[in-house]
Amino acid sequence: MSVKPANCANCDAPLSGHYCANCGQEAVLHHASTREFLHEFIGHYVALEGKLWGSLARLLFRPGLLTNEYIRGRRVRFVQPLRLYLTFSLLFFALLKLTGGGLHVPEDADTAAPSAEVAAPAKTHAGAVKLVQDDKEGDNAEQYVGDQLARWPALRQQWHAFNRLPGEQQVGVFQKGLYSYAPYAVFCLMPVFALFLKVLYLGSGRRFGEHVLFALHTNAFAFFIFGLMLLMPWDAGKMLWLWLIAYLPWAMRRVYHSSRFGTFWRWALLMLSYSLVLGLALAFSSAMGIMSVGH
């Protein structure tokens, strides 16, 4: 049994109960252990007393409601938006790395086996010709990019080192860049998502912080659904795709109170604009893997 100290280990204030009256730390501290860390995570981080489940129910099944609850001031009973977003985004990227980034799409049966044997010589010849053509095009592309990077010798050196790698290793370089930098890139795009909303809803009276709040909640939902898709068979994931597509306009209508037509054209413009920016960010994240070649 641990002996209660006379003073707080954190602020050295005199102790009179189970918690320090000055800083709130527990009077009796347990030794660092895996069990203690798990208790801290479950008891405080995900708020076992009901915050997590109440937040999840509203986030997943009632689009926009969690955002409205927060705007109304009902905040203590739910998990904070940023914590919710960071949790689901980190879990998604961890699953993406563990699963190799592929959805469970069923493999088609080989129904063309007899004709495949007949066509094999022609395919082999055509493949060899295409390989030579690709090599020539690749050399030209490498030279062109190298010339464009002449002002940055270090980057040019990394580019040539990348092109000397076998094809499989080049794919691995891009994957490494994606896994390493994409979480940061996507997080940095939250203000961009909110800015698009601000422009689309000019005159609505909504503050920029409310758009950021909406962005955090809707993107947290998207990461949760994409994470499930990585774990589920493709046939089961089809329903999740439908819910993912319907979720955002439904949430926009509930939070911003616009008409169906007004919600639809804003949703279409938002998806087009954000998809372009997101695609560029992910491409840049993958390309950043080139800088790790040789290091």
Image (tube, rainbow, N blue to C red):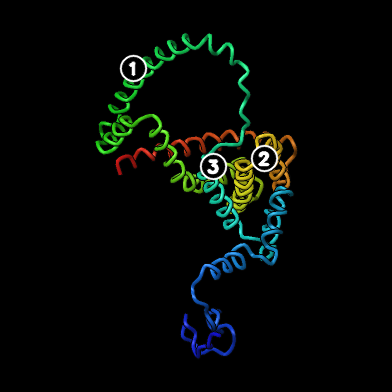
Few, some or many C-alpha atoms within 10 Å of disc 3 (few <14, some 14-19, many ≥20)? Answer: few
Amino acid type shown at disc 3: Thr
Few, some or many C-alpha atoms within 10 Å of disc 2 (few <14, some 14-19, many ≥20)? Answer: some
* Secondary element at tag 3: helix
Residue position marked by numbered label 3 in the rendering: 99
* Secondary element at tag 1: helix
Amino acid type shown at disc 1: Lys
Q: Nearer the viewer, mark 3 or mark 2?
A: 3
Q: Position of residue 18 (x, y in %)?
A: 59, 84
Q: State left or right for residue 72 relative to residue 158.
A: right
User: Is the Cβ of the residue at disc 1 closer than 8 Å to that at disc 3?
Assistant: no
Relative to 285, say whether 109 is above or below: above
Which residue is depicted at the point 27% across and 26% down? Answer: 147
Q: State left or right for residue 161 relative to residue 245.
A: left
* Secondary element at tag 2: helix
Residue 291 appearing in the image: yes
Which is nearer the eye, 212 or 128?
128
Which is nearer the eye, 162 or 19?
162
Q: Nearer the viewer, mark 1 or mark 3?
A: 3
Which is nearer the eye, 46 or 154?
46
Q: Can you tell which mark lies on residue 105?
A: none
Label 1 to label 2: alpha-carbon separation:
43 Å
Which residue is depicted at the point 43% across and 15% down? Answer: 127
Nearer the N terminus, badge 1 or badge 2? 1
Residue position marked by numbered label 2 in the rendering: 244
